[in-house]
Amino acid sequence: MMGIYVDHSSTTPVDPRVLEAMLPFYQEQFFNPSALYPEGRRVQAALGQSRQTIADYLNCSPEEIIFTSGGTESDNLAVLGVMERLGKKKFITSKIEHHAILSATDYLEQKGFSVVVLPVDEYGFVSPAELEKNIDDDTALVSIMWANNETGAIQPIEELCEIAHKHGALFHTDAVQAIGTQEIDLSKTKVDLLSFSSHKIYGPKGAGVLFFRKGVELVPRNMGGQQEGFLRGGTENVACIVGMAKAIELLKQEREGRCAKLSDLSDDLLVWVEKLLQDVKINTPKVNRIPGVINMSFKGVEAEPMMILLGAAGICASMGAACNSSSVEPSHVLKAMQVPADYIRGSLRISFGKDSTAEMPEQIATELDKILKRIRK
Ligand code: PLP
């Protein structure tokens, strides 16, 4: 039995309406969308319809969308695809990006590209002035995430994008954590490339999108057939793409309601945390944050025992830190924000979802109070 699931930034359950839309594509409509017989054509049409639904939601053209396996692949294709295509040598990103970007950055550096990783301030924001200081006319691409996956901080994307363009660079944003709550209208924002993933918005795992604005050229990472305009070879993951489009359709209808609820839940959690807990530092900024996510650190506490005790109490949350078999490393995001040493190891991210209940904030804070007292004793 699942208790209190508050790890929606990590992944979300598939909405039953999404699953219902997907199921026919595993059985009676299993055909290869590249097949020329009518059954294959019908599956191709379903793919086209999914592409149109997503393009309509983002306000872009269907030709500007590439279906991928998720956020990681979209990020890799954006960064490596652009850098390998353009003659310019410099790539700029930030210290708080997801590893899908940071690992691609390391790879570029090994290949001899010049790489700049921008710092953030104590609230986790990238400063446009820092970008201005580091960008030059040899910069091919700037990639800064729309919202951070650990703290929920929303970055000043429009200003950053404007600076990139002023210097003739393209701008990519990882919108994996933004898509579920932020309005994304590609006719208003000037970003050249944007990634998102289906499993953060009640769609299935294994599907994602890379938007690339008309005129942007990419070197493919998956070489094979002619799928996705030769930019991503491989038989399409039809059921998951159809499911992702259904998740987008539901998001269009429900986003505002979901945001209002998420906002109430995270505000409520902050009230309960302040009422019940001592020596806590809230790492999520007060303004410019996505609703529903609170990242906090507890003084003198290690995340691992806290997570184990929370898990035993039926609360599924995330520690906002990288865990390997022998140690729990403080998160690179919190390190970049220079969270004090006596707080940084005890971090916790609570991320509510559309089906979270109004009782959860009090239940979580009450349980945390007991756990922290026990650990600190
Ligand atoms: N980018 C961000 C900001 C994320 O939060 C995640 C997943 O947590 C990813 C990229 C990777 O997405 P996926 O799991 O679909 O590969």
Image: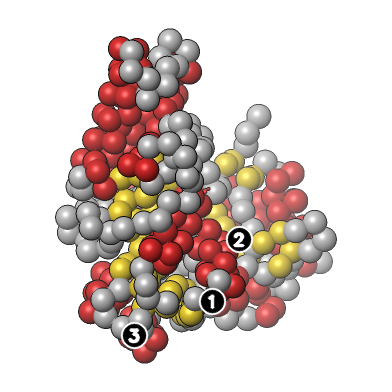
Residue on which disc 3 sits: 136
Asked whether the viewer can see residue 233, the reply is yes
Q: Quadrant of residue 165?
A: bottom left
Tag 1: amino acid: Gly
Residue on which disc 2 sits: 320
Label 2: element kind: loop
Going from N to C along the chain, the mark reached first, 1 or 2, is 1
Q: CB atoms at circles 1 and 2 under 8 Å apart? A: no
Q: Which one is closest to the eye, mark 2 or mark 3?
A: 3
Residue at the location (40% across, 14% down)?
Answer: 29
Separation of marks 3 and 1 at Cα, in angstroms: 17 Å
Name the spot of residue 60 as percent of width and height, x first.
21, 48
Residue at the location (31% across, 58% down)?
Answer: 217
Left or right of 47? Residue 59 is: left
Name the spot of residue 37 as percent of width and height, x first.
33, 13
Residue on which disc 1 sits: 112
Q: Quadrant of residue 331?
A: bottom right
Tag 3: amino acid: Asp
Q: CB atoms at circles 3 and 1 under 8 Å apart? A: no
Query: Which of these two is toward me, 335 or 21?
Result: 21
Tag 2: amino acid: Gly
Residue at the location (54% across, 54% down)?
Answer: 350
Within 10 Å of disc 3 (Cα), the crowding (few <14, some 14-19, many 20+) is some
Residue at the location (82% across, 61% down)?
Answer: 326
Above or below: residue 229 compared with residue 157: above
Left or right of 274? Residue 61 is: left
